[in-house]
Amino acid sequence: MGQTTKSLNEKQITLIEQQKIYFVGTAAESGTVNISPKGGDSLRVIDSKTLAWLNLTGSGNESAAHVLRDPRMTVMFCAFEGAPLILRAYGQARAIHRNDPEWEIYVSLFPESIASRQIFLLEIDSVQSSCGMSVPYFSYEGDRDELAKWSERQGSEGIQNYWLKKNQRSLDGFETDIAARSGLEGKK
């Protein structure tokens, strides 16, 4: 049923590239465990040992805070059609922010969005596949556009103000580094 490997194989990469939703799990050494659903065109397989995902502005910034304290991350995919499968990529992650040297390299892999907040790189330590026989079938109807519309209404300055107001600390009070690493330190 289940199998663990050190990297993604071609079949797994194909499954990942077809996904419309995936889930990201992070945790610090204490406090809240965070599991976030992600969608849209926000994930890239860089190679068999590396995933990159674009983190858009949201109400929280848990992944950034957690990765600063403990870089463990799990990204999970489920087959909602076709053969059943659950695929988890476990590894060490880091966040890339707008002022980081690698930002332009990685942000160019994704559709342009004013809401782009961080890019996470996951260096895969292991990959686990399991049966997924109890995962129900679901049909994809389309992506939501509410975040894109909200972001456009805010504009670049509004997004940055939102980061300063809502995205600097996690639910548990951990720093996210968004102000310093996005060039916003000292702004109000």
Image (cartoon, grey):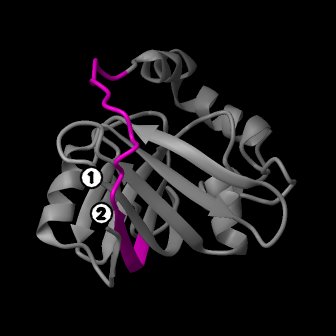
Left or right? Give the position of 3 relative to 155.
left
Instruction: Give coordinates of residue 108: x percent, y percent.
Output: 27, 52
Reading the image, the residue beneath label 1 is: 108
Of residues 10 and 134, which is closer to you in this image? 134
Q: Residue at x 59, y 73 (%)?
A: 72
Instruction: Give coordinates of residue 52: x percent, y percent.
Output: 36, 61
Pointer 1 and pointer 2: residues touching (CB < 8 Å)? yes
Tell me the crowding category of disc 2: few under 14, some 14 to 19, or many 20 or more residues within 10 angstroms, Cα based.
Answer: few
Left or right? Give the position of 2 relative to 120.
left
Q: Residue at x 51, y 71 (%)?
A: 93
Left or right? Give the position of 148 relative to 71.
left
Magenta-tinted stretch = 122-143
In the image, farthest residue toward the right: 173
Q: Which quadrant: the N terminus?
A: bottom left
Kindly state the secondary structure of the residue where label 2 is placed.
helix
Q: Is residue 168 magenta?
A: no
Residue 60 figure quarter: top right
Reading the image, the residue beneath label 2 is: 105
Residue 131 figure quarter: bottom left
Residue 63 figure quarter: bottom right
Q: Residue at x 74, y 67 (%)?
A: 28
C-alpha separation, residue under disc 1 versus residue under disc 2: 6 Å
Q: Residue at x 38, y 71 (%)?
A: 128
